[in-house]
Image (spheres, rainbow, N blue to C red):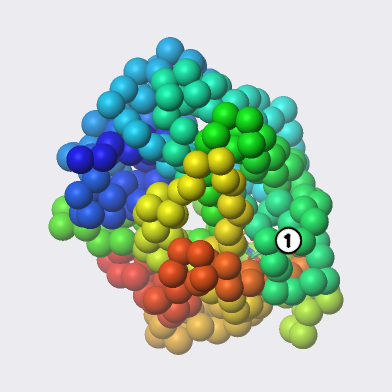
Amino acid sequence: MSRVLVTGGAGYIGSITTALLLDQGFEVTVLDDCSTGHRDSVPAQARFIEGTILDGEIVRRALEGCDSVIHFAAKSLVGESVEKPDLYRNNNINGSQILFDEMDGAGVTRIVVSSSAATYGDTHEQPILETLKAKPGNPYGETKLAVDNLLTDLAAEENFAAISLRYFNVAGSLKTPTRWLREEHDPETHLIPNLLKATKDSPLKIFGTDWDTPDGTCIRDYVHVHDLADAHIRALNQLIAGRHEIINIGSGTGYSVREVIDTASKVVGYEIPSVNVDRRDGDPAILIASIEKARSTLGWSPMRDLSAMISDTFESKK
Ligand code: UDP
């Protein structure tokens, strides 16, 4: 039996990946400081340690009995990173460095890491290939790129087996036998949960309608969290000592903010109320993934579409 340490396993993507790992027969230890995650999102079968990756002693304890790591624990809001870059550097880069040092000390060298399309920055080259030179446009993306670079060095120098999954836009929810696992951020900044909350009195704010795109709103590539969690487990099974691979995870298709709103209006059966406002700091115009590497390296393809991402999140709130 193999035990995986999931850092950030009380968060949105971490808790759903933990649930699927347990389903597939892995043992799981979750390490989470519950700053943005929720203790009750961690499935009961997982060992849970409340603590931060910034504390080497707690990380050492969490690594006991584990032979691999899936590393989610990070601050992950673009807007917040523009306001508090030092918080992002400390949590994301220093925290990861402490985790990697402790792994090295414990002889645990297999790791799958949550990276981000925010590493690529604003680019006209769409879809984005992993070979594109990364040029992050905000501190969040910079911290994710710095962590990827640390792993490239660890693979070369310490024989780590590492895969960074560069997520595009993640959405959707997972129904487990006991409860729905879904995005529960406070404040919520993401498009799909926000549009489901929109009312006439508090309409969805569309951030910018003057982007260089066909309808003037930003284009993103949305992937279902269940598909994304599957990609982590596939990655875990494909790790190769001395290699660090970077692999995009998206759907390979772009939707504008207006297209997402239109799809959501059809799914929920009423018109989502919206209002046009200024652009949000740090947003690039378009992000669409090339997912050829995910297909060929992981044998992974997205199985669930945008309507499913919206409808199961809508269901989960009933
Ligand atoms: N967006 C929006 N209103 C919202 C939330 C998001 O118009 O309330 C837009 C945002 O500017 C971006 C897209 O929706 O173009 C996706 O944003 P989200 O925050 O979901 O993910 P990100 O792309 O920042 O990772």
Q: Residue at x 80, y 56 (%)?
A: 133
Q: Is residue 32 left or right of residue 48?
A: right
Q: Residue at x 81, y 65 (%)?
A: 123
Q: Residue at x 42, y 20 (%)?
A: 106
Using the image, determine if residue 88 lies above or below residue 179.
above
Identify the image quadrant of the N terminus: top left
Rendering quadrant holding ligand 1: bottom right
Identify the image quadrant of the C terminus: bottom left
User: Could you say which is closer to the camera, residue 158 or residue 3?
Assistant: 158
Q: Amino acid at mark 1?
A: Thr
Q: Using the rendered view, name the quadrant where residue 145 is placed.
A: top right
Using the image, determine if residue 117 lies above or below residue 45.
below
Residue 226 visible (yes or no):
yes
Q: Residue furthest top?
A: 57
**Where residue 245 sits in the image (x, y, percent)?**
59, 52
Residue 229 visible (yes or no):
no
Say what secondary structure mark 1 lies in. loop
Q: Using the rendered view, name the quadrant where residue 219 is placed.
A: bottom right
**Where residue 36 sits in the image (x, y, percent)?**
46, 38
Q: Within 10 angstroms of label 1, few (less than 14), some, or many (20 or more) residues?
A: few
Which residue is label 1 attached to? 131
Question: Looking at mark 1, is its residue's CB closer than 8 Å to ligand 1?
Answer: no
**Where residue 167 sits in the image (x, y, percent)?**
56, 58
